Image (cartoon, rainbow, N blue to C red):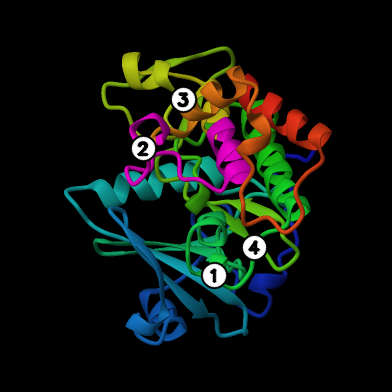
């Protein structure tokens, strides 16, 4: 079991001056990141959302990175920054995106991650990458196994444990060997052993949020496990968790799938874009795992 404070390979930061005030990682100046991203050029934007914008960049030593520039909405930037730093600042796991460092200057808050170069699971299943190639069943299972290993690590190897709260296809990055890397810890919550948390505001993404969390605000690691089950169904079927373009009985992926299984039609749920269907045994095992989540 890897140590929480293990100092992993520092190669991405080779040649950069040693400087940190959080006890880990590298403190980048605004100028460093301005140069790395070519003045935060629009061409370098690789993602954006309510939290801010993510840019592709290259450090002075040649290391490719992703720079998350957090929007400063009434202290939200400071909160998001602190949550990510506390949750994964000095955690190392091959299926978690590595946080290399940060920038704190004036009101600016930025996080610098390793660059994962092969898109995310959403783009492979539903987006631009799906137009060029369909993920094989083996590649899909490899991505899910990596995701499961990372979640087991966050929930069982760390104290306090980390509940991600936003497990979804777009937050599962994929490298060129189809290893999964969980990203975006801006909503994460740290919980002591055996503890649950009552949230006044439910966070997460519609379609992936566990019903008990959505209904009562009760949060523990089972919330991530439910989201992982939805992700597994999404990978098996190639369908979005919520899809209003489908008939009413098929809008909600979980409800539709339970109905199909109950009617002994589970062989009809497999993604039609798969070149090689899984065997009956493989499909049954995957569906059973998903429904147990």
**Number of other residues with Cα within 10 Å of mark 1, as a class: few under 14, some 14 to 19, many 20 or more:** few
Task: Using the image, determine if residue 247 lies above or below residue 212.
Answer: below
Q: CA gap, disc 2 to disc 4?
A: 25 Å
Mark 3 and mark 2 in contact? Answer it, CB < 8 Å.
no
Identify the residue at the far left of this view: 74
Residue placed under numbered mark 1 in the picture: 131
Q: Do the residues labelled 1 and 3 touch (CB within 8 Å)?
A: no
Query: Is 244 covered by the magenta stretch?
Result: yes
Q: How far apart are marks 1 and 2 (CA)?
A: 24 Å
In this rendering, the count of numbered labels is: 4
Sequence-wise, the earlier of marks 1 and 3 is: 1
Q: Which of label 2 and label 4 is nearer to you?
A: 2
For the residues bearing labels 3 and 4, Cβ distance under 8 angstroms = no
On screen, residue 10 versus residue 254, left or right, reads right
Tell me which numbered mark, 1 or 2, is placed earlier along the sequence.
1
The Cα atoms of the two marked residues, 3 and 4, are separated by 25 Å
Where residue 247 is drawn, which disc sits there?
A: 2
Q: Which residue is drawn at 40% across and 87% down?
A: 38
**Residue 44 sits in quarter:** bottom left
- Image quadrant in which the N terminus is located: top right
In the image, 71 versus 4, the foreground residue is 71
Disc 3 target residue:
255
Residue at the image point whose x is 68% and y is 35% from the top: 267
Q: Is residue 158 visible?
A: no
Q: Which residue sits at x=55%, y=42%?
A: 234
Magenta span? 228-250
Classify residue 213 as left or right of residue 7: left
Label 3: which secondary element: helix
Q: Is residue 111 visible?
A: yes
């Amino acid at each position: 079991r890897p140590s929480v404070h293990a100092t992993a390979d520092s190669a991405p930061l080779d040649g950069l001056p040693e400087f940190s005030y959080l006890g880990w990682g590298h403190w980048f100046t605004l100028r460093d990141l301005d140069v790395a991203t070519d003045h935060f050029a629009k061409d370098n934007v690789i993602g954006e959302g309510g939290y801010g914008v993510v840019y592709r960049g290259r450090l002075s030593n040649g290391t490719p990175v992703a720079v998350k520039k957090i929007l400063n909405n009434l202290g939200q930037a400071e909160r998001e920054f602190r949550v990510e730093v506390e949750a994964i600042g000095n955690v190392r796991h091959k299926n978690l995106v590595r946080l290399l460092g940060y920038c704190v200057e004036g009101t600016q808050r930025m996080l610098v991650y390793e660059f994962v170069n092969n898109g995310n699971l959403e783009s492979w299943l539903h987006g631009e990458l799906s137009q060029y190639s369909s993920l094989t069943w083996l590649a899909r299972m490899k991505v899910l196994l990596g995701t499961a290993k990372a979640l087991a690590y966050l929930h069982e190897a760390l104290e306090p444990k980390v509940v991600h709260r936003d497990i979804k296809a777009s937050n599962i990055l994929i490298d060129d060997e189809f290893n999964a890397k969980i990203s975006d810890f801006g909503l994460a919550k740290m919980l002591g052993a055996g503890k649950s948390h009552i949230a006044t505001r439910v966070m997460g993404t519609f379609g992936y949020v566990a019903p008990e969390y959505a209904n009562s605000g009760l949060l523990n690691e089972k919330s991530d496990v439910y989201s992982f089950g939805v992700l597994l169904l999404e990978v098996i079927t190639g369908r979005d968790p919520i899809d209003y373009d489908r008939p009413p009985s098929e809008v909600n992926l979980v409800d539709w799938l339970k109905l199909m299984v109950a009617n002994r039609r589970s062989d009809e749920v497999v993604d039609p874009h798969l070149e090689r269907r899984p065997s009956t045994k493989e499909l049954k095992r995957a569906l059973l795992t998903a429904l147990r989540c």
